Amino acid sequence: MSQRTARAAVYDAPNAPFVIREFPLRDVHPDEVLVKVSMSTICRSDIHSYHGLRHNPCPGILGHEIIGVIDQLGAEIKRDMRGDTLAVGDRITWTEYFHHGESYYRDIHDMPQKSNGVRKYGHDLAAEDPHFLGGFAEYCYVLPGTGILKLPDELSDEEATPINCGVATMVAVTEATRIGLGDVVAIQGLGLLGLYGCAMAKSRGARLVIGIDSVADRLELAKKFGADVTIDITERDEDDVVAEIRALAPPDGVDAVIEVCGIPGVIPAGLKMLRVGGRYTLGGIVSADANVTIDANMFVKKWITLKGVHNYHPRHLIQALDFVVANRGRYPFKDIVDSTFKLEELGEAFRSASDCSVMRAAVVP
Ligand SMILES: [Zn+2]
């Protein structure tokens, strides 16, 4: 029996300081994996949870964009989602959510992430066994119903860590948008999701990718990720921006708009950018009470298809990994994770991520 303990950065209530606490590490059950965390990155939804915009049990360990090395492998777990054998010492990523047992949404509607009773890493009580279910800790247990994927050695930790949330979500979003050859695509928000969105839109055949944001560094970076044109909306009139974007997509506007900025106020402008028959996908509006006034007549007269996408199917995690491996020479994915903090510096890391002074903050415990 192991009698080990390990450290985690815990918060007791929204906005309360992170404190380092020790919890016991127990041996794995046959259907579990214990992972030594190599790196976790701070996702926008971690920030929402920390600020209390999203309910999260406390005391909690945040962090769901995690990779790590297998420390203990349950006897029943032999292979990853793709059929590769798993062994102690392998570096892995895994789905940000887990669920096992019956699931109406998984089995009937192909939406496992919407299974009743689904649980997510970084959204659990630290006080209860197995304590370690979040990324901002030295260890994390991977529980039954999680899709596990072995990481190839060629990927750096910086390239691999965001794959299981931001990148996989963007695979789901760009798939739902049905981006095809020759499309003109506008992307609202050039954080991690938007940057990957630019690169994926290009890979899916877009003729022109337009990146929209108000942060100068992000607009600059987007050009390295496949954005053909970037539009700075700082202090600009909405109608002006819409007119400029529509002029880039003659004769009648863009084929598709993707929202990944999390600001509901951008939706009316996005709708106006679209041509008749255009597609609009919302991927960033994850907090409740995102109220906005829309002229619903536009949906009818312009034949607009509006979709929302939340999280992803396990197949999207496989596609996300393959996309990063295949395109890492073409796009500087490693540059997105642009700062590294220790576990003790998690508060500072959250402040830097919150005020957008860093793109993706990494924590190396
Ligand atoms: Zn996330």
Image (cartoon, rainbow, N blue to C red):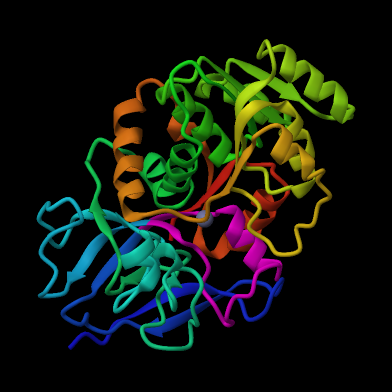
Q: Would residue 173 appear left or right of 303 to someone viewing this image?
A: left
Instruction: Name the side, left or right, on which 279 lies relative to 290.
Output: left
Q: Which residue is drawn at 27% across and 84% down?
A: 26
- Percent x, y for residue 309? 53, 51
- Say how many tags the image has: 0
**Magenta includes 169?**
no
- Foreground residue, 289 or 127? 289
- Horizontal side of 348 relative to 241 (left or right) equals left
Above/below status of 251 relative to 112: above
Q: Does the magenta stretch include residue 42?
A: yes
Depth check: 318 or 246 in front? 246
**Residue 228, image quadrant:** top right
Range of residues picked out in magenta: 38-66
Quarter occupied by residue 242: top right
For residue 42, side relative to residue 178 (left or right): right
Q: Residue at x 26, y 87 (%)?
A: 3
Q: Relative to 38, does residue 157 appear above or below in the rendering?
A: above
Residue depicted at 52% across the width and 55% down the height: 310
Foreground residue, 99 or 353? 99
